[in-house]
Image (cartoon, coloured by chain):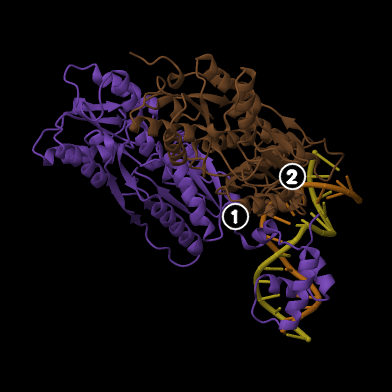
Chain colours: A brown, B purple, C orange, D yellow
DNA sequence: GTGAAAGCGCTAACAT
DNA sequence: ATGTTAGCGCTTTCAC
């Protein structure tokens, strides 16, 4: 097959070790030898076999990023950012999607394919804390996203409560009083929307109003279709909302679609705020006001944390689990502004 | 570190080879031995070290998929489909994005990280045929997407000319005569839009009209912003178009955004057709008529071809390069239909 | 049917 | 500064 260290050594008339030294930029090599070896490398077109190197070093240089769904632009955008951040550490990213199934999330967190990877960045939505209690044989892991866990792992998430609060406050500021929340789940208090829902409650309470829990609409998933359906259900009520805060942009966009179909105007009749700042939000027929997490920072922090965990794995005292909060901004667009002429 | 074959062998009181036989479902093992070994495996929690296995076999079980941009939902959706298709062959996908840079596309095609992967699925947009002439040391590769190459590789692409033709014919059918094309590039005849542009010309000619080349608008990239800008430029002309066929959905969506801003109605004033059928197209304020490639088939075919190439690599006569055309459909939505009440 | 030993390509000790 | 050797964990002849 390929050219090996030995072939190069033979050609250059030196030992394998010397070639290895050259390849790895080991300092103590005479310039002459280095040149000779380098020439042999070039002539033979030698390229190190990473598999062998990894077997030896116990590292693969590959990390896994597992997100619920690549079809959701938010996760696709985050994935792109993670790939770039990983490249800065000379790491390659193995991308997996869990389809938002707890079963697959457990599988991944428990070290599925763990022998191929040095570490794991997991963005869970259905996983529960108990699934994380025991992870024998599983590689270092960093959590990403808005679900909270009672488990000793680094967790990168923006301040969801604060972000949601500022989104809802914005709606209150423009005079809305009947503000619905779209995208809750029924079953669990620890649901993904948990924190954003809390922000919704806090903002409303802080304004001296009483949160109307009947204005909290549940959805099956977190897609445009879910938002469209939930919005439709909400509109069938007598006292319809005058504003909507959605769990994410996709739900918000689906909701807007329903509003247009029903002949309602955004934002005049109903103002809409989303969460994620996916690119699509800027280019809809009515651009969407949204909470924009700093995705580049998010990705970079996750990778940095993971790299650190990998470095100390098995070594000295690992740092205690951190919760890191990257920044975010509320981006006001047409869906909450006076409409263009 | 982990538990190795040797540990299991010791525990079960057999040789390494026997354990290996059990792990690999080698037929000639007595049920008794098998049971004993299996028990040792379970007790010790043994999991094979893939790196070592791969070093030995010269295979890694990992393939790379390189797309221009994950932020483009089309590629994100295709990536998801490829991951699923690969899983059916027990392959893992390493995802890379080239940012649409020829330099990065060349790098990837030339076997960047080739020692970690068994094969490569590349979806190029800037790459030229000459970049593909020599690929020493590079792994089996399958091409994906609408650029044509004079190079001996399997290529999975839908019939772009035919698809474009049917899209434009649809616009003609609903009575449009001044049909613009959005998303060409200036420099190269072999540009990505090449085939779709040809379809545009053919359909117009077939209708007995003369293609108006001044109606072909170039864009820098293939994003919403590019579509918005190109549309704006087109509208500044005196004889504005009454329909637009865009290179992809993102450009079409950007164009629609501009139309709305200018107070033009879709489809009454200007009808719009896109290409890709990304999910967003179904949920815009005006849903988008578009060409829908069969993404699942596309992904499955690409993976299947690659698997076959990997299987015969270095072995017997490889099959001659194939060009495979998965199906597509024209999906008619509001952007070319009578508007809802 | 099972075992012993060689070796995939590399790096880390230990020599020199 | 460079060479020698062992071994990472596995599969694969080739014996028995």
- Numbered disc 1: secondary structure: loop
Of B104 and B78, the residue lying toward us: B78
Residue B222 spot, x, y in % from top left: 38, 31
Q: Is residue A208 left or right of residue B120?
A: right
Q: Is residue A81 left or right of residue A20?
A: left
Residue A8 spot, x, y in % from top left: 66, 49
Tag shown at residue A140? 2
Q: Residue furthest front?
A: A238
Q: Are marks 1 and 2 in contact (CB under 8 Å)?
A: no
Residue B223 spot, x, y in % from top left: 40, 30
Please name the residue shown 61% across and 31% down the image: A197
Mark 1 or 2, nearer chain start = 1
Q: Is residue B278 above or below residue B216?
A: below
- The quadrant holding residue A162 is top right
Identify residue for label 1.
A2
Q: Is residue B206 visible?
A: yes
């Amino acid at each position: 097959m390929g050219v090996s260290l030995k072939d190069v050594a033979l050609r250059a008339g030196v030992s394998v070790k010397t070639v290895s030294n050259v390849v790895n930029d080991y300092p103590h090599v005479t310039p002459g030898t280095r040149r000779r070896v380098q020439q042999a490398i070039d002539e033979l077109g030698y390229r190190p076999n990473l598999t062998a190197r990894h077997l030896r070093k116990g590292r693969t240089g590959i990390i896994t990023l597992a997100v619920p769904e690549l079809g959701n632009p938010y996760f696709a955008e985050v994935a792109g950012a993670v790939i770039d951040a990983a490249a800065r550490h000379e790491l390659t990213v193995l991308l997996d999607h869990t389809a938002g199934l707890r079963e697959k999330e457990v599988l991944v967190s428990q070290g599925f394919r763990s022998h191929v990877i040095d570490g794991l960045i997991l963005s869970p939505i259905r996983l529960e804390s108990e699934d994380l209690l025991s992870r024998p044989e599983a590689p270092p892991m960093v959590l990403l996203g808005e679900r909270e866990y009672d488990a000793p792992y680094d967790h990168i998430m923006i301040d969801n409560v604060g972000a949601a609060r500022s989104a809802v406050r914005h709606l209150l500021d423009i005079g809305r009083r009947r503000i619905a929340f779209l995208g809750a789940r029924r079953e669990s208090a620890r649901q993904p929307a948990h924190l954003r829902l809390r922000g919704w409650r806090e903002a409303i309470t802080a304004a001296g109003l009483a949160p109307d829990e009947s204005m909290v609409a549940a959805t099956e998933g977190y897609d445009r279709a879910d938002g469209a359906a939930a919005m439709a259900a909400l509109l069938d009520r007598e006292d319809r909302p005058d504003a909507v805060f959605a769990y994410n942009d996709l739900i918000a966009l689906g909701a807007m679609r329903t509003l247009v179909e029903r002949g309602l105007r955004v934002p005049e009749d109903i103002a809409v705020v989303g969460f994620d700042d996916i690119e699509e939000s800027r280019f809809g027929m009515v651009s969407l006001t949204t909470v924009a997490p700093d995705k580049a920072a998010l990705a970079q922090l996750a990778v940095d944390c993971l790299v650190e965990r990998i470095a100390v794995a098995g070594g000295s005292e690992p740092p205690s689990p951190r919760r890191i909060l990257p920044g975010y901004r509320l981006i006001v667009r047409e869906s909450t502004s006076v409409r263009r002429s």
